[in-house]
Image (cartoon, grey):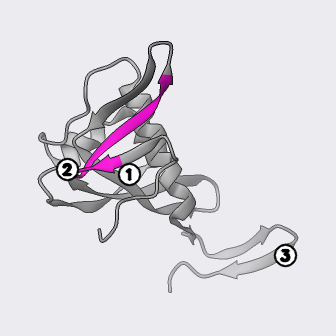
Amino acid sequence: MTQPPQYAPRYFVKEHCLYESGVNRQGAFTRKLCNLAPEIVCEVTLDDGAVTTTYVRLRGVHESGRLLPEIEIPAADLASFNWMAERWGMDCILEVGKTVKDCVRHAIQTTAAHAEKKTVFAVTGWKKIGEEWYYSDARR
């Protein structure tokens, strides 16, 4: 990771940790969300001819400066965060708070705008995409 992820303006990275800033009834605030800076690097749509499933490839950097390996998870699992400790280790920690998970999920999703997007066809045969027919040979 050569530069910090490009999050929506309300999120920022400080010392490899993800933070949120904003204004509430008490005034301006800044809060730490987690001790890493995760981002989506690729959104992969897998089309097997019957079902289409989306996966996201994530990478990150831990507050220690350690690069976190790229991992691929089903997009549907992003919000659960069960993948984080399992794939990146127990030292990757979300802070405590009612909305922390939602904010971290939202921040990660805002990086998708800069991520590669690709479709993988895992079926051999003809497929209509838009108004055109295409032949896919998944064996190649």
Q: Is residue 119 above or below residue 85?
A: below
Q: Which quadrant holds residue 31?
A: top left
Sequence-first tag of 1 and 3: 1
Residue 38 picture location, percent across and down: 33, 51
Q: Quadrant of the N terminus?
A: bottom left
Q: In the image as oriented, which residue stretches furthest toward the right?
A: 131
Query: Which disc is residue 53 wearing?
Result: none
Secondary element type, mark 3: strand
Q: In the image as oriented, which residue stretches furthest toward the bottom?
A: 140
Which is more toward the observer, 77 or 95?
Answer: 95
Query: Which disc is residue 132 wearing?
Result: 3
Secondary element type, mark 2: helix
* Distance (Cα) linking label 2 and label 1: 12 Å
* Distance (Cα) linking label 1 and label 3: 30 Å
Q: Residue at x 50, y 19 (%)?
A: 24
Mark 2 = which residue? 88
Amino acid under label 1?
Ile
Q: Residue at x 71, y 81 (%)?
A: 135
- Extent of the magenta region: 13-23
Sequence-first tag of 2 and 3: 2
Residue 79 picture location, percent across and down: 42, 35
Amino acid under label 3?
Glu
Q: Residue at x 25, y 47 (%)?
A: 36
Residue 22 part of the magenta-drawn span: yes
Amino acid under label 2?
Trp
Mark 1 = which residue? 73
Residue 18 part of the magenta-drawn span: yes
